[in-house]
Image: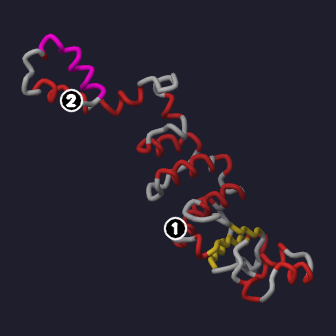
Amino acid sequence: MTLVGDRLYSALAPLAYADDGGDLQALCGAVGTMFEQVAQIVETGPNGEPGWSQLLDVDRCPAYALPWLGQFVGVTVDPTLDEAGQRRQIRAETGMARGSVAAIVAAAQRRLTGTRTVVMRERSATACSAEPAYGLTVFTFTSETPDPTGTEADIRAVKPAGIVLEYLTDTGQDFETVRENFATFADLTAGYTDFDGMRTDTP
């Protein structure tokens, strides 16, 4: 029995004495099904939360209502993501932050696994050699990127207009990452015993 159906059946208790075959109960359940979704939303929560409040709480909002909730912060929820991914998308992005470094990284991480590492380089000459100020390189690790095409599409959806994007995946860090993480050659040799260890590392 649904919540509404059970209440309707209880309200018809004077007629239920003859409901030996359960026909009245089945009818109440069928009628209640039409209103069950709304009833679940308007009910007071288990900890006394006001009715309807779950629709505006990203942690409690029903999965089917997440696209509706996302519009309040300027997020077009991606229906191809699982429920956890959609909730992360709403938490991580807002319309006011669209195009920012944080929003681009959040978009790039949407489909990643593991540590969800994203390397982002602004003013990238490799992305736009003619005018590096408009170039943006975003890099993720192959082992953490099950859907590179989808990840690139997510980044393009939030990057500022006019910015030229270069999106890359690789099995390990590139030399630019090594240069950023190790100030001197002595630091590098202290961190790695051989070239393969350095090249395949995913810091």
> Which segment is the magenta one?
3-15
Q: CA distance from mark 2 to mark 1?
A: 42 Å
Q: Nearer the viewer, residue 44 or 97?
A: 44
Please state, as top left, top right, bottom left or bottom right, where the C terminus lies in the image.
bottom right
Which residue is disc 1 drawn over? 150
Mark 2 element type: helix
Q: Amino acid at mark 1?
A: Gly
Mark 1 element type: helix
Residue 96 included in the magenta stretch of the image: no
Which residue is disc 2 drawn over? 29
Q: Residues within 10 Å of mark 1 (few under 14, many from 20)?
A: some
Residue sitting at x 48%, y 38%? 61
Residue sitting at x 57%, y 69%? 152
Name the dominant secondary structure of the magenta segment. Answer: helix
Q: Residues within 10 Å of mark 2 (few under 14, many from 20)?
A: many
Residue sitting at x 44%, y 44%? 63
| Above or below: residue 7 compared with residue 78 | above
Please state, as top left, top right, bottom left or bottom right, where the N terminus lies in the image.
top left
Q: Amino acid at mark 2?
A: Gly
Q: Nearer the viewer, residue 186 or 85?
A: 186
Name the image quarter holding residue 126. Answer: bottom right
**x and y percentages locating residue 59 in the rendered image:** 54, 40
**x and y percentages locating residue 144 in the rendered image:** 59, 70
